[in-house]
Image: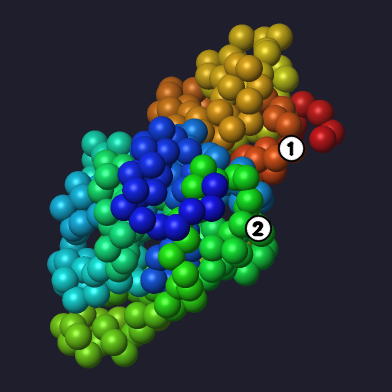
Amino acid sequence: MLTKFTSQSTKLAAKALADGLLVSFPTETVYGLGADATNDKAVARIYEAKGRPSFNPLIAHVCDVTQAQEIGQFTDIAYQLAHHFWPGALSLVVSLQPECRISKLVTAGLDTIALRLPAPYKVRQLIKEAGVPVAAPSANRSGRISPTLASHVVQDLGDGCAFILDDGACEAGLESTIIDCTGKQAVILRPGPVTAEMIRSACPDIEVNDVFMVNDEAPNAPGQLTSHYAPSKPVRLHVTRPERDEIYIGFGKMDVASDFNLSPSGDLIEAAANLFAMLHEADKTQRKRIAIAPIRRDGIGAAIHDRLMRAAADSLLPRDDNL
Ligand code: TXA
Ligand code: MG
């Protein structure tokens, strides 16, 4: 539903977020498509709504620095950058806090997370009232340009959102700068409104390195796979008859017993929501390999396939069929 961004609609939209629904809201950069970052199914709905053919890690939006530090481990670099540029168009990649509740679908299974404290007060209020961090990529369908007006979101996503909060045009029209703060230098992964020059002048102690590695829509090229989780065990796909030394991840109704099932009812959104958590669990077992049952390719199934192909890329093991 398209509605003005008021204190009244903020309350309703915050409730929708807490209930696992999608809400589009305007930030100082672009309109975001938000979901509860601690809810696997809610985050899976983002991918479904965007029609994104791959799982990229998403930015978690927070309402204040305290909430950010509950989720991420702030290095000195992260702390300084937050101090100078938050709230604002800067996303900081930091290591996840060990016990935090963030969905593995937000981090795409990584142990780091991109965090952002957006500038508009209304957005911070929305996140605060929702009571959870909000994962939000730009609110456009995959392959389309990023929306800077509520009408763009309506055209692109229409019914996909419980609320589209309209507050006019976004100021920057360009996505936030993303900086990896986990090392000794600040590494710019995606250029944006906060530039290397701005950082050098505000924080002369910080060494800034600008390698632009992140591409929103196109899956990262080989060699740039640092932002992708891969299980340490070899992975075999389209398996209908697992071998004894394999841990078997099923999907839908199974003829053969499986150790895990991504979705016993064959629901692709549920499968996407469980994907990273189950890959991690399977990777922790004693068995030598991970075998995965055939999975449909429609809707969000395309992104699941993309993810599994990457997981299996190094293994090149025979499949059970010629799919
Ligand atoms: O301006 C913005 O940042 C907008 C508004 C809505 O806030 N959001 C946005 O989010 O652009 P998204 O999800 O489209 O961009 C996420 C980018 C992806 O390209 C992803 O690869 C990178 O951030 N990213 C997220 N987590 C990461 C991580 N742990 N390590 C490296 N890159 C990460
Ligand atoms: Mg985008």
Is the residue marked by circle 1 packed among few (<14), some (14-19), or many (20+) residues within 10 Å?
few
Q: Position of residue 194 (x, y in %)?
A: 35, 80
Where residue 89 sits, quadrant-wise, is: bottom left
In the rendered image, which residue does mark 1 sit on?
A: 297
Q: Is residue 80 left or right of residue 35?
A: left
Q: Is residue 189 left or right of residue 102?
A: right
Q: Position of residue 262 (x, y in %)?
A: 57, 25
The relative height of residue 90 versus residue 235 in the rendered view (above or below) is below
Number of marks in the rendered image: 2
Task: Name the residue located 54 percent from the left edge and 63 percent from the top edge.
Answer: 150
Q: Amino acid at mark 1?
A: Arg
Is the residue marked by circle 2 packed among few (<14), some (14-19), or many (20+) residues within 10 Å?
some
Alpha-carbon distance for marks 2 and 1? Answer: 22 Å
Q: Amino acid at mark 2?
A: Asp
The relative height of residue 210 versus residue 89 in the rendered view (above or below) is below
Which of discs 2 and 1 lies nearer the camera? The answer is 2
Q: Position of residue 267 (x, y in %)?
A: 63, 25
Asked if one can make out residue 196 in the rendered structure from this viewpoint, the answer is yes
Q: Is residue 65 left or right of residue 28?
A: left
Where residue 83 sits, quadrant-wise, is: bottom left
Where residue 294 sits, quadrant-wise, is: top right
In the rendered image, which residue does mark 2 sit on?
A: 156
Task: Name the residue located 56 percent from the left edge and 35 percent from the top edge.
Answer: 272
Task: Name the residue located 34 percent from the left edge and 85 percent from the top edge.
Answer: 196
Q: Position of residue 66 (x, y in %)?
A: 16, 53
Check the picture and name the quadrant holding the C terminus: top right
